[in-house]
Image: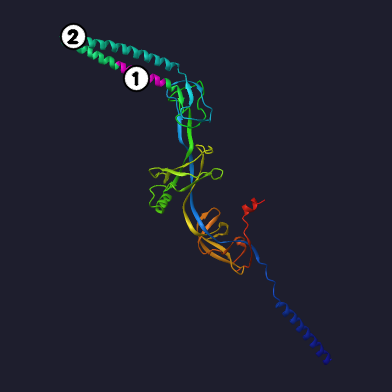
Amino acid sequence: MHILSKSRGRSALAAAAFASLALGGCGKAPAPAPPATEVEVTEVTKRDVPITQEWVASLYGLVDAQIRAQVSGYLLRQDYRDGAYVHRGDLLFEIDPRPFQAALSLAQAQLAQAEAQRGKTQLDVNRYGPLAKVEAISQQEYDDAVQANLAAQAQVSAAKAAVEQAQLNLDFTRIVSPVDGIAGIIQAQVGDLVGPSTGALTTVSDVDPLKVYFPVSEQSYLQFMAAHPDADSFHANVDLRLILSDGSVYPYPGKYYGMDREIDPNTGTVEVIALFPNPRYLLRPGQYGRVRATLSTLRDALVIPQRALTELQGGYQVAVVDGGNRAQIRTVEVGPQVGTDVVVTRGLEAGERVIVEGFQKVQDGTPVTPLPYRNAPLAAAAP
């Protein structure tokens, strides 16, 4: 019994030892490494970056001439097609000329009467002059004749002025364009009684080139003047581009034309005017857009996609992929935005790889599998 008991004890010890070895062996087996995280990366590039600003802009004709009737009368006809291009001197409207023709005829008749009266008084002066010298008539009679002749001459001058005014009024019944440009839609109807107080009949706009007004803040104005101390105004060589309401960029660049004399105290802005060529008349008065100006250029700036940035407590971070394909989280300082990119002023070097897609999936030291950054808009546009 004692021997059997010993044998059973040894068997139990052996089983316990085997179990212990088995358990110990399982604990020392290495766990499989997690797969590296796939991320999209791009290199930090160095290039010259133009610094631009944009302002809301309003478009006006180089000349917007309001066409008004200068005499009162019934509108007989419209002599142009709404929206047509007209030349200076082209007939636009005609007002019933008959009352003005009658007034001219009356003024001409009065002029003839005044000239006849002057002729009589002049004959009196010529006749009375020698008689007064020999005292055949009194000096008073001669003086009266001279004064009557002067009054007759004044009447002739007044009658001539009346004829000129009547002729001018008659001419005003034919309303012509004062400029080359596009004539707007008529604001009256044929048969209406029109006159100086009835408002504009239409507007003719000279639209090539076209004026673009945009308000520049006082701060931007001062910054520009500080950067260009020799310029006494918005420099004529500043590159100006017009962005239309649909987001397209107008193909012709503009040039600085002028600046208002004062800063508007209500808005804190100064009005700037640019001229944009408009050979196809695409631009029209009343349109709105944005003017973009290139004010300076940053040389050898470090640029990354804005999507690579993560904002944290007022600062910015990027994830850099090192030579061992591990993520490194860095704090960076940024400069101006350039389209979908941004300038980095501190924290990166040219040629380093930054994570653009997948930043939220990594931490400092996370192993990654870097893939080339696929620009989503470009990928969508590819066939």
Residue projecting furthest to the bottom? 2
Q: Give the range drawn in magenta.
A: 155-169
Q: What residue type is labelled 1?
A: Ala
Residue lying at 63% horizontally and 57% vertically, measured from the top left? 374
| Residue 314 showing in the rendered view | no
Residue projecting furthest to the top? 136
**Seen in the image, is 98 located left or right of residue 369?**
left
Give the colouring mode of the picture: rainbow
Up-down: is 374 above or below 173? below
**Seen in the image, is 379 located left or right of residue 269?**
right
For label 1, the residue is: 161
Residue 92 drawn in magenta: no
SS for dot 1:
helix
SS for dot 2:
helix
Local crowd size for mark 2, using a 10 Å CA cut-off: few (<14), some (14–19), many (≥20)? some
Of residues 82 and 219, the one drawn nearer to the viewer in this rendering: 82
Which numbered disc covers residue 18?
none
Of residues 232 and 126, the one drawn nearer to the viewer in this rendering: 126
| Residue 331 showing in the rendered view | yes
Which numbered disc covers residue 131?
2
Of residues 5 and 324, the one drawn nearer to the viewer in this rendering: 324
Residue lying at 29% horizontally and 11% vertically, measured from the top left? 117
